[in-house]
C-alpha cells in the first residue's frame, strides 16, 4: 500500500534560517503529492502540490519538487518567519484516498 | 463561501453517551471523509464517502458510524463514547485530489 514518511520534529529554527522538511513516499503508479499546513487550533490547509515527476510546487516562499527517482517531496523555504510556526503534513493521493505523513512541527524563534 | 463547516467546536461526553458530529460542505464535492488527530499519530481516516448513499470504512472505523443522505452532509456518530475516542476530529471534502478541511471538533470523553 501507499505510505508517507516525514522527518520527526519538532524542528526549531531562528527567524531567517533555511528550512528543509524531508518527505519520502512509497506508492504504486503516479500519485500527486501535497504539503498541508496546520496552524494552532485550525484545520489543515493546502500549502502546495505537484502532480507529476519534476514538477515544482510553490507558495508563500515554500517550495517542493516531485522527485520520482528518489521518491521524495522535500519542503524548503529560504528564510522562515515566526508566522511559519505550524505543523506541516506531507501527503499523496493515488486513487482517491489520501495518505498522510505523521506531521512535522516547526517552531521558529525571533 | 463557507467551505467545510463542522459543529460543535468543543464537546465533553461521559463514557457510554452517544453523539453526532456534524459536517456540511457547500462546494458540491462528491468525496468526503472523517479523520481523527492524536498526538504523535498524525491523521487517521475513520470513514469516507465517494458520493451520496455510498460510505466505506477507513483505518480506524470501530465505534463510529456514518451516513451520506445528501452530497452536502456527512455526520459522524459515536455510538457509545469511550475515553479512547478523546481526540480532535476533522471533516474534509475533496476535489481533484485536494482536501478542504473543517476547523475541527475537540472531543473529550470522561
Image (spheres, rainbow, N blue to C red):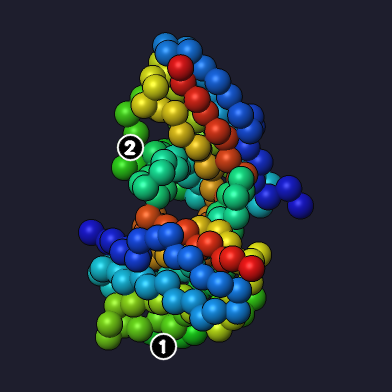
Residue at 48 percent across and 13 percent down: it is B14
| Protein chain holding label 2 | B
- Label 2 belongs to which residue? B60
Q: Please state which of residues B45 and B38 is positioned toward the viewer in this rendering.
A: B38
Residue at 57 percent across and 66 percent down: it is A108
Residue B45 position in % (x across, y down): 39, 44
Residue at 52 percent across and 42 percent down: it is B90
Residue A50 visible from this viewpoint: no
In the picture provided, is A26 more to the left or to the right than A10?
left
- Looking at the image, which residue sits at the far right? B1
Say if A68 sits above or below B41 in the image.
below
Residue B19 position in % (x across, y down): 52, 19
Numbered tag placed on residue B4 in the rendering: none
Residue B4 position in % (x across, y down): 64, 46
| Protein chain holding label 1 | A
Give the class, few, some or many, for how many residues have Cα within 10 Å of label 2's Cα (few <14, many ≥20): few
Residue A59 position in % (x across, y down): 61, 76
Give the class, few, some or many, for how many residues have Cα within 10 Å of label 1's Cα (few <14, many ≥20): some
In the picture provided, is A105 more to the left or to the right than A70?
right
Residue at 31 percent across and 71 percent down: it is A24
- Label 1 belongs to which residue? A54
Say if A64 sits above or below B45 in the image.
below
Amino acid at each position: 500500500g501507499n505510505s508517507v514518511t516525514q522527518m520527526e520534529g519538532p524542528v526549531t529554527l531562528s527567524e531567517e534560517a533555511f528550512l528543509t522538511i524531508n518527505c519520502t513516499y512509497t506508492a504504486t503508479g503516479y500519485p500527486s503529492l501535497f504539503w498541508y499546513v496546520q496552524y494552532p487550533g485550525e484545520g489543515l490547509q493546502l500549502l502546495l502540490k505537484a502532480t507529476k515527476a519534476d514538477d515544482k510546487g510553490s507558495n508563500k516562499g515554500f517550495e517542493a519538487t516531485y522527485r520520482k527517482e528518489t521518491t521524495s517531496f522535500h519542503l524548503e523555504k529560504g528564510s522562515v518567519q515566526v508566522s511559519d510556526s505550524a505543523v506541516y503534513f506531507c501527503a499523496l493521493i493515488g486513487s482517491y484516498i489520501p495518505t498522510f505523513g505523521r506531521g512535522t512541527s516547526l517552531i521558529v524563534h525571533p | 463561501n463557507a467551505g467545510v463547516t463542522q459543529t460543535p467546536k468543543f464537546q465533553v461526553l461521559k463514557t457510554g453517551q452517544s453523539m453526532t458530529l456534524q459536517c456540511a460542505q457547500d462546494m458540491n464535492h462528491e468525496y468526503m471523509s472523517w479523520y481523527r488527530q492524536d498526538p504523535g499519530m498524525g491523521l487517521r481516516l475513520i470513514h469516507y464517502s465517494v458520493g451520496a448513499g455510498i460510505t466505506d470504512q477507513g483505518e480506524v472505523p470501530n465505534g463510529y458510524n456514518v451516513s451520506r443522505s445528501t452530497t452536502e452532509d456527512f455526520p459522524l456518530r459515536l455510538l457509545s463514547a469511550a475515553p479512547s475516542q478523546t481526540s480532535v476530529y476533522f471533516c474534509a471534502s475533496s476535489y481533484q485530489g485536494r482536501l478542504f478541511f473543517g476547523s475541527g471538533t475537540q472531543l473529550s470523553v470522561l
